[in-house]
Image (tube, helix red, strand yellow):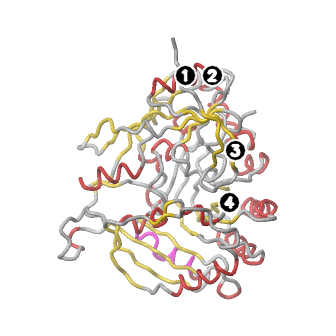
Amino acid sequence: MMKVTKPVKKKISGWGNYPVESCFVYRPENETDIHDIIEGTQDFSHIAYGLGRSYADTALNKDQGVIRLEQLNHFLHFDEDQRLLTCEAGVTLSDIIDVFLPRGYFLPVTPGTKLVTVGGAIANDVHGKNHHVDGCFSEFVTSFDLLTGSGEVMTCSREENSEVFWATVGGIGLTGIILRATISLIPVESAFINVTYEKAGHLDEAFDKFIENDQNYKYSVAWIDCLSSGSSLGRSVLMRGDHAKQSDLPMNVQDPYALPNKFPLKMPVHAPGMALNYWSISAFNQLYYSSFKDESKLEDLTSFFHPLDAIDDWNKLYGRNGFVQYQAVFPKDQQPKEGIRKLLERLSSDKRSSFLAVLKSSGQANHGMLSFPMEGYTLALDIPNKKGLFPFLKELDEIVLAHGGRVYLAKDASLDEETFKQMYPRWEEFLNVKQQVDPKGVFRSSMSRRLGLTD
């Protein structure tokens, strides 16, 4: 007799701590448990949940099922000749770094946190500081096994079930549950990056430096002071780098693959709502910008790629009301600089303080039906959830639409159905594939209902 893992009804959220919703949370121990949950709860819908690093309601399912996959976290096979790793979907990027960096391998694409599951990286088609060169995470996914709403396990790749592959990549978990995947790793000679820092006094200068030098670096990103205004609007610190060779390391480095031992700080409680405000963040931004100078130096991989992972639960800095991360991409052929300038002007004029503002260049779009990047530039903003936020975000949406851009679904908390469908013109194609693999609508989420992708 089938035994269904008993759920716990509890309030959960994404990384932004907004929204908070009551969901029935399942914690399967293996693949059989997942099958039993799906088959034994025909009156429920479900969505997969990894480590909860999607920011808003991507992996929430109000009053319905949420299937947490942390325990499906086993490495299955590594083909060293092809550098191909097969693992369960609950394996984290941190797990991969811990095991394979000492062997001379690193992730081909990593977002700003390594506390992301492989399944989540595929479902959100994450990107990193090297999108302008290497594209999204999906570029390095050879195949994956997908549990569909009918209970079938379907192997998907560019050659096999390719439509389902490209619907699932960036498909925010709505085609089914990724059980395991095969991804490629890249060889590296050390655990360090040669980083070049360069300051830009305003947005025009930042764009000029991107255009002039991006092609010379594998990794490229800029921190922006989003509260600067006037002639300093968009002042930035550009950070570009490449993997360091062993010959680049100081003589006293005994193990080129050893990351420095760092004990993470911990944010034990939510900060008071008033802690991060226009004035405190303005002061921080001034100090941060002033702390840099034009120089080149070695940095370890963690410091360069995942600096915020040094603070456990850093999302609590924004208080109990939480925050949203708003990330938009502006296509190269529709005056992206002017679109970004308008976003920054609105932030500055409305005194919407963003502790973190990141500008990156992005390469060509892939075939993912709901994948986010396109050739151009992206701007990511952390914005506290305070009075008037959502009408303000609607204004930002209108700026993004006017410049042919779109908002990243992994971080979105506010798009309405009409705006989403304008930003993602392949939504009907996506729904056609979803109907084929999930005709009963087993996989749904709070986001999918908000965007009109499910009932």
**Residue at horizontal 51 percent and vertical 23 percent from the top:** 35
Q: Which of marks 2 and 1 is in front?
A: 1
Question: Which range of residues does the magenta coloring cover?
Answer: 206-217
Check disc 4 and report the residue beneath it: 320
Residue 224 falls in which quadrant of the image? bottom right
Q: Tag 1, which secondary structure?
A: loop
Check disc 1 and report the residue beneath it: 4
**Residue at horizontal 62 percent and vertical 45 percent from the top:** 370
Amino acid type, callout 3? Glu
Q: Tag 3, which secondary structure?
A: strand
Q: Earlier in the sequence, mark 4 or mark 2?
A: 2
Q: Which of marks 4 and 3 is in front?
A: 4
Q: Which of marks 2 and 1 is nearer the N terminus?
A: 1
Q: Is residue 352 left or right of residue 376?
A: right
Q: Tag 4, which secondary structure?
A: loop
Callout 4 environment at 10 Å: few (<14), some (14 to 19), or many (20+)? some
Amino acid type, callout 2? Thr
Q: Position of residue 378 (x, y in %)?
A: 59, 64
282 within the magenta span: no
Say if mark 2 contacts mark 3, CB within 8 Å.
no
View extreme (front): residue: 268
Q: Which of marks 2 and 3 is nearer the N terminus?
A: 3
Q: Which of marks 1 and 3 is nearer the N terminus?
A: 1
Q: In this view, does 184 lie to the left or right of 222?
A: left
Amino acid type, callout 1? Val
Q: Position of residue 394 (x, y in %)?
A: 79, 59
Check disc 3 and report the residue beneath it: 21
Callout 1 environment at 10 Å: few (<14), some (14 to 19), or many (20+)? some
Residue 41 — which label? 2
